[in-house]
Image (cartoon, rainbow, N blue to C red):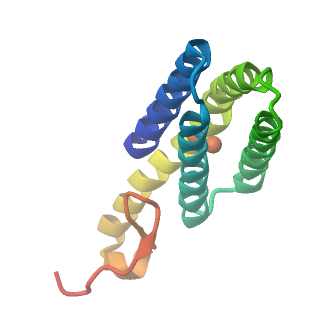
C-alpha cells in the first residue's frame, strides 16, 4: 500500500494472527492473544477511518462498512470462545486471515492510492498557489489526527 504507518499496522495484525494460531496449536491460554489481536484491529480500523475522514475520501462509507462487518464477526467468534466453544478459535483465525487478505488487496489499496495522491496534491497546491499551508488544507499527523500548525515557522 505504501502508506508506511498503515503498512506497519497491517504487519502487526498478521503477526498477532500468527501468534494466536501458535497459541491455539500449543493448547495454552489464548485470551492474551485474542485480546491483543482485537486491540490491533480496533486501533487500526479507527486509524484508517480518521485518515479517510480527514482526506474527505469518497468511499469512506463503503470502506467503513467492511470494517464494521469484520468487527462484528470477530465479536461473534470471541463470544463463542467465552462460552467454551473451542472450535471458534481456528475459525476466527481462518476468517480473519481470509478477510484481511481480501480487504487489504482491494479496499485498503484503493484508500492508499488516494491518500498518496492527495498528499502529493496538497504539497503541489501549497507551493503553486503560494498559499500558506495553514490556509490551504487540514494538517494531519502520522496518526491521522488533525492539528493546527503554528503560523510562524
Ligand atoms: Fe481498511
Ligand atoms: Fe487496513
Count of numbered labels shown in the rendering: 0
Residue 131 in view here = no
52 lies above or below 54: above
Q: Residue at x 61, y 63 (%)?
A: 53
Q: Residue at x 46, y 40 (%)?
A: 9
Q: Quadrant of residue 80?
A: top right
- Ligand 1 in which quarter: top right
> Horizontal and vertical percent for residue 140?
42, 66
Q: Nearer the viewer, residue 91 or 132?
A: 91
> Horizontal and vertical percent for residue 11?
45, 30
Left or right, 82 with reference to 118: right
Q: Quadrant of residue 125?
A: bottom left
Left or right, 47 with reference to 80: left
Q: Nearer the viewer, residue 30 or 13?
A: 30
Q: Residue at x 66, y 31 (%)?
A: 106
Q: Nearer the viewer, residue 66 or 112?
A: 66
33 lies above or below 67: above
Q: Residue at x 80, y 45 (%)?
A: 72
Left or right, 112 with reference to 128: right
80 lies above or below 43: above
Farthest top residue in view: 25
> Horizontal and vertical percent for residue 132?
31, 79
Q: Quadrant of residue 35?
A: top right
Which quadrant does the C terminus fall into? Answer: bottom left
Residue 111 in view here = yes
Amino acid at each position: 500500500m505504501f502508506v508506511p504507518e498503515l503498512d506497519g499496522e497491517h504487519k502487526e495484525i498478521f503477526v498477532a494472527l500468527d501468534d494466536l494460531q501458535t497459541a491455539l496449536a500449543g493448547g495454552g491460554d489464548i485470551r492474551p492473544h485474542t485480546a491483543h489481536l482485537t486491540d490491533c484491529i480496533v486501533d487500526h480500523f479507527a486509524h484508517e477511518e480518521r485518515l479517510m475522514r480527514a482526506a474527505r475520501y469518497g468511499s469512506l462509507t463503503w470502506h467503513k462498512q467492511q470494517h464494521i462487518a469484520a468487527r462484528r464477526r470477530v465479536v461473534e467468534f470471541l463470544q463463542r470462545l467465552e462460552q467454551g466453544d473451542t472450535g471458534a478459535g481456528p475459525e476466527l483465525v481462518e476468517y480473519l486471515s481470509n478477510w484481511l487478505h481480501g480487504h487489504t488487496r482491494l479496499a485498503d489499496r484503493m484508500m492508499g492510492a488516494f491518500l498518496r495522491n492527495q498528499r502529493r496534491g496538497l504539497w503541489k497546491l501549497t507551493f503553486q498557489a503560494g498559499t500558506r499551508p495553514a490556509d490551504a488544507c487540514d494538517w494531519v499527523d502520522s496518526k491521522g489526527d488533525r492539528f493546527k500548525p503554528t503560523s510562524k515557522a
